[in-house]
Amino acid sequence: MSLLSVYFMFVLHVLSVLVTVKCYTYQTSPVFLSFPDLAALDATSRANEPRFEDPVGTTDNMEVVMKAQLFDPGLPAEPMRLRLGPVAAAGDHCVAKVTGNGEYIVRAPLAECGNKVMFTDSAVLYSNLLLYYPPSSPGDTFQRVHVAVPVQCEYERSLNVLLVFKSPSHLSSEDWSSERTSSVYFLGETVNMEASVHHHHLPLRLYVSSCVATLTSDVNSSPRYPFIDHQGCFTDSQLSGSKSRFLSRVHNSRLQIQLEPFLFHQDRRHSIYITCYLEAEPISKNDPVKKACSFINNRWRSVDGDDHVCESCIHFHVNRGSTYIL
């Protein structure tokens, strides 16, 4: 029975954002936004302005610290009435907590509490509102917002930087429960490959731009067989009877690949090197060029459900060249 030894090697090329630099409010000195129904508040009175420190951004959190006596030095505000983001934003961590030194703190993950993210050429900006909800008055039918303080964290955007990957790529067992210890495959087996990306800073979606099989570690050597190509088209799945495919996603940061073993025609070397180029981008970006598409039941299908992104794959056809499919 034929066997195939696969040396699995991923070359990682990732565009990402990382490294926190500074966090600040929109204004160099706080300016507090009052709603029209509370215009009687003296917005120009420094004595009545909320007192808090500039927010601090870590690799995965936004922290806002404020004085307990937020408005009146003699009357501490109730922490439960201070929160980051609207009431609809789920999570107890969005509500202020007592620190024990006369201050309150809100420490929330960057992706939660209604934080909004915006990209510029050089930075990633996270913004939100620190809201104060006063006690309800008799007859109120909804909760009023007394004060809204804009806060923002800025992170440098660095291009062509490799992310720190957690178990980035490996051969998986048949049921995907563990890493496969052997790189030898027999006729009829399936090569299960899995890649994942882990980043505290931003929710990411992982893609495989291309995968190439070669007989040496040199990705440009000949013969070579690109079985995934054109920004995520699994061209090998077009072959008649092929079971090669991307599996449906279980998480945006993970991608699972099933590949039928093959050998190069008239070549006795049974060790094949697989080089895959990975890309990860923020989930919110939704770039239509990046995709993970397989040819299943005579049509291209996306692992993310939006099959229309696979339309570009129709124009490309698999070229076996000097390969021989087992």
Image (cartoon, rainbow, N blue to C red):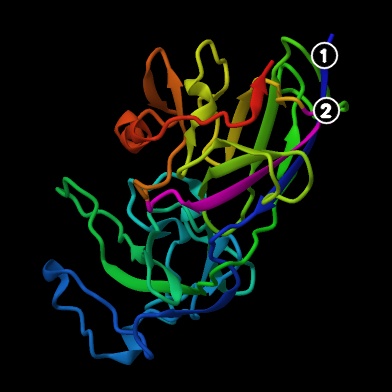
Q: How packed is label 2: few (under 14 Cα within 10 Å), some, or many (20 or more)?
A: some
Q: Residue furthest right?
A: 181
Provide residue 162's location: percent of width, then percent of height: 65, 62
User: Please, what secondary structure does the residue beneath circle 1 have?
Assistant: loop
Q: Report the Cα–Cα distance between label 2 and label 1.
A: 9 Å
In magenta stretch: residue 30: no
Quadrant of the image containing the N terminus: top right
Q: Which mark is residue 257?
A: none
Provide residue 227's location: percent of width, then percent of height: 57, 33
Q: Amino acid at mark 2?
A: His
Q: Residue at x 35, y 81 (%)?
A: 26
The chief SS type of the magenta part is strand
Q: How packed is label 1: few (under 14 Cα within 10 Å), some, or many (20 or more)?
A: few
Quadrant of the image containing the C terminus: top right
User: Please, what secondary structure does the residue beneath circle 2 have?
Assistant: loop
Is residue 28 shown above or below 132? below
Quarter of the figure with residue 258: top right
Provide residue 12's location: percent of width, then percent of height: 65, 53
Q: Residue at x 61, y 64 (%)?
A: 59
Provide residue 324's location: percent of width, then percent of height: 66, 22
Q: Amino acid at mark 1?
A: Ser
Can the viewer see residue 66? Answer: no
Stretch in magenta: 267-285
Q: Residue at x 50, y 47 (%)?
A: 92
Q: Residue furthest front?
A: 266
Q: Give whichever of 244, 319 is nearer the camera.
A: 319
According to the picture, the residue beneath numbered tag 1 turns out to be: 2
Q: Give whichever of 24, 260 is nearer the camera.
A: 260
51 relative position to 159: left or right: left
According to the picture, the residue beneath numbered tag 2 turns out to be: 270
In magenta stretch: residue 276: yes
